[in-house]
Amino acid sequence: MKLAQVILAVMTTALTAQGAVTKEPFGTTPGGAAVEIYTLKSDAVEARIMTYGARIVSIKTADKTGKVADVVLGYKDFAGYTGDKNTYFGSIVGRYGNRIAHGKFSLDGKEYTLPLNDHGINTLHGGTVGFDSLIWTGKEIPGGVEMTLVSKDGDQGFPGTLTAHVKYTLQGGALKIDYTATTDKDTVLNLTNHSYFNLAGEGTGTILNQEIEIHADKFTPTDAGLIPTGVLAPVAGTPFDFTKPMVIGARIGDANDQLKMAGGYDHNWVLRGQNGVEKVAAKVHDPVSGRVLTVTTTQPGVQFYTGNFLDGSKTGPSGKAYAKNFGLCLETQHFPDSPNHPDFPTTELKPGQTMHSVTTFTFSVQK
Ligand code: BGC
């Protein structure tokens, strides 16, 4: 081989392992703004990510027999996304992912008021127009795409102009999400990704027969509005104990107040290990397809949500309606309602500081 051929061969291999990136138009918002979609391809995974909500639209990967399926819930076209204000399929949620009690918090002695978009009681996923339904600016980077959003001072009631960057990069089976954010005034934030996974393939049925392991000895029980009471309760001896792999549906119907209130799992687990240091948060395994998802994160918590509010009214790309429990979310995060719990890890960000967190979704198969 000539030197040029060798270099080309090496470059091609690097590209395959790291992921090739292409960009296309995906749709137009009702307001007339253009939305683009980036396709990231590696030797193991194809992931599509659009600028609307910086959302993961699809993740295609093979099962133990080599059969490829899309393992996240979504829509066949862009219009599906703008017509859905409830599920947050694939999105980056913010400025504050998860709930803030009664839409109020105080910072530096000043009280802030947010929209009550969760049954008129609490704020959910950043308010009425959260980061999930804004258009981010996409930029191709090696092996991926960087999404940028500037949220103005006062956006949804939050103080400070916040600049957020979310980099998605694909290498082999690993889709890495790298978050950074800065502000020009003291503020609070909690950014996460809201993908619904179904390792058997979207639209194929519930996730109840799949197994999950969550690396946490405690969780944050909630009130009826799903706001943490403030207690860090041990999982031992409860249906919240996933320290060993367990079938998701095995205890979901138990006579347990926490499960009854949420209609299943919709809780934050307090991860083992250190806040700010990357560790395994959870592993999901589908025994039928053999697909495995490993979630690592620097965040202190993860919201494990079993798609309790899916009700058959949304239909995915395969044409199948998504019924209750057809997908699960693993939203790596700071704890819900942290601005009102000074003893929880802080979600405050000040000018001059940079918030940085990393979460990686790695796909593999177990034969
Ligand atoms: C919440 C659920 C909520 C869902 C919205 C999850 O993060 O914990 O309670 O219904 O998002 O799709």
Image: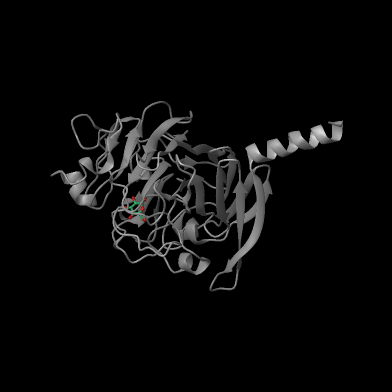
Can you say whether 179 is above or below 224 in the image?
Answer: above
Drawn side of residue 179 relative to residue 262, left or right = right
Q: Is residue 157 above or below residue 27?
A: above
149 left or right of 286 in image:
right
Quadrant occupied by the C terminus: top left
Return the residue nearer the eye: 344 or 203.
203
The front one of 290 and 134 is: 290
Where does residue 341 sit, x and y in percent of width and height?
A: 33, 40
Quarter of the rendering occupied by the N terminus = top right
Q: Residue at x 57, y 61 (%)?
A: 135
Residue at 55% x, 44% y is 45
Q: Position of residue 120 (x, y in %)?
A: 30, 63
Going by the image, does 258 lie left or right of 65?
left
Classify residue 54 as left or right of residue 251.
right
- Depth check, front residue: 107 or 306: 306
Residue at figure coordinates x 49%, y 61% from the top left = 133
Q: Residue furthest top?
A: 273
Q: Position of residue 104 (x, y in %)?
A: 35, 53
Asked if one can make out residue 174 in the rendered structure from this viewpoint, the answer is yes
